[in-house]
Image: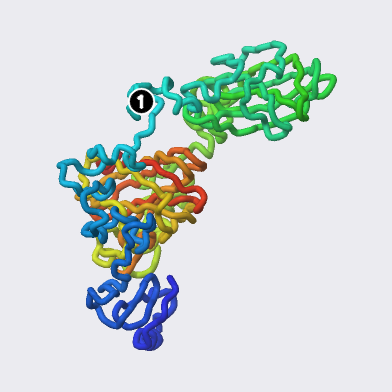
Amino acid sequence: MRNATLVPSILISCLLLGACGEERILPVCGNGVVEGRELCDDGNLEPGDGCDESCMLESRELCDNGVDDDGDGSADCADPDCFSNPLCQGSEVCTNGFDDDGDGLVDCADPDCATHFSCQVRERCDNGADDDGDGLIDCEDGDCSGHPLCGGCDAEIDFGALAPGESRYLVVDTAEAQGLPAPLCAEGPPALHMRFEVAVGFHLRVSAAALSGSLVAALLREEEPGVTCETDELLCRAVEPPILQIERSALPPGSYRVVLAAAEPGSTGQVQLGLSLIAGTEEICDNGIDDDGDGLVDCDDPGCAGEAGCLVEDCDNGVDDDGDNLVDCADPDCAQAPPCLPPEDCDNGLDDDGDGRADCADEECAGTAGCLGSDCVVNADLGRLGRGAMVSASFDTRLATHDNRASCGGDGPEVVMAFTLDATATVRARLHQTGDHVLALGGEAGAGSWCDDAEYRCVDPGGSGRPGDLTVQRLGPARYFLWVDAVSSQSTGEGSVILEVHPPFV
């Protein structure tokens, strides 16, 4: 419950009825007490006296100081409060959806907005188009110099695709390194990267003999080959006489790097290196790897047929599928399966269907009577959307305010977008960004609620500049909020969100 000063009559009723436990007491606008998210309360609901009918301060926006004075997400001439101000007449405001200067062109379609940050288009590096209009396409554009598809993380030596049973032997010199990151146990560059790909699970044997210098050897696995340069470091060891030997078993398919780097500053050297890939001989049925190299993983492999972990109870077919003498919802394996959960009661304060969200915070309650309405301040309304719709919106959190918090890490300013579904649908939101943001989606939580009171999903892309992807199945016809939340006040930036609406069973 948000901090609030309780009205005496409400408190007395609460005590008499014995319902003070987990019941939420919402602020009452017009009672002369500033409560919760109210910014004022003059004891009435009359607008025009400095405090409006929602207990929000009426316009205090100064139209020429570059600051969002009234905290509604818009500053100066971009704020509707300033549209009639002489300072804002005759010039196009680039983010308000109006033809301010009367030339028939709105926002970014107006040449006056060509240099405005919200109208700048960044070069995408993989679509064959000149996105930013500088005459250079994809990797020809210097904006793409650090992109993986444009050689931003290419290894000095690339063995290509290798298969179990293959080996590679060579002498390498770290003096030939070209500046790629060094592993954690090294003192820094230079670091020489050797890359290879494997399509099936395998065992790896690495031998390294130092011919000169003081070096370390590391094994890395690429997280998203061709998408980012990020890697997971699996091991790092000093290459010490007479020879370093490393073995790693049950490695999953993927793209790997063996890296040689200086153990101390300025210590380059040569290493005689051997890589040997060995096939797995037996499928391990619970590790997510194709251990025996037949293209089938875990329970999909015939070798795992009949294994206890590969028997799954189908929760609505009337059959004891996993052989434990318990059928469908009587089987504990089905305790959290949709056919075995009760529906959510949207006004009893309980998580009836066991999904961790109660009442309006559960997407099943979106659009119900008790969950209509909100005091959420919205920066952009994407409109009413039907199945098959796809819309995009740009954002910039550098001048935004911090009024809401996303559960997966939004402690900085945020930009809030609203949209309305006209039928049950699956919604997918894709985030492209500079800075470091999380992406959250929620619904209305009733009168007096805020944007983040009914959060349904939150995704953290995991770092500055990384894309995010959020999908929520079967959202009912209702109004929803989508907000981009900076991880901290130092991680703000700009970007765009693409929102797709699909049929409910995508």
Q: Taking the image as drawn, is residue 233 in sight?
A: yes
Does dot 1 land on a helix, a strand or a loop? loop
Label 1, on which residue? 134
Q: Of residues 105 and 411, which is closer to you in this image?
A: 105
Direction from residue 473 to residue 197 in the image, left or right? right
Query: Percent position (x, y) of residue 317?
Result: 34, 44
| Tally of numbered discs | 1
In the image, residue 202 above or below residue 317: above
Q: Quadrant of residue 370?
A: bottom left
Q: Quadrant of the N terminus?
A: bottom left
* Res 203 seen here: no
For residue 155, what is the image quadrant?
top right
Q: Is 413 situated above or below 280? A: below
Q: Nearer the viewer, residue 81 or 286?
A: 81
Q: Residue at x 27, y 56 (%)?
A: 87
Nearest the eye: 333 or 482: 482
Q: Is 173 situated left or right of 320 in this image?
A: right
Compared to residue 120, the image places residue 39 above or below, namely: below
Query: Looking at the picture, does residue 255 appear above or below residue 90?
Result: above
Q: Measuring 37% from the left and 57% from the top, which residue is drawn there?
A: 65
State the image coordinates of residue 233 (x, y, percent, origin top left): 64, 33
Q: Residue at x 75, y 16 (%)?
A: 271
For residue 132, what is the image quadrant? top left
Q: Is residue 481 left or right of residue 283?
A: left
Q: Nearer the viewer, residue 228 or 386?
A: 228
Left or right of residue 347: residue 302: right
| Amino acid type assigned to the residue bearing label 1 in the image | Asp
Quadrant position of the C terminus in the picture: top left
- Residue 465, percent from left and from top: 47, 39
Image coords of residue 70 (percent x, y): 35, 64
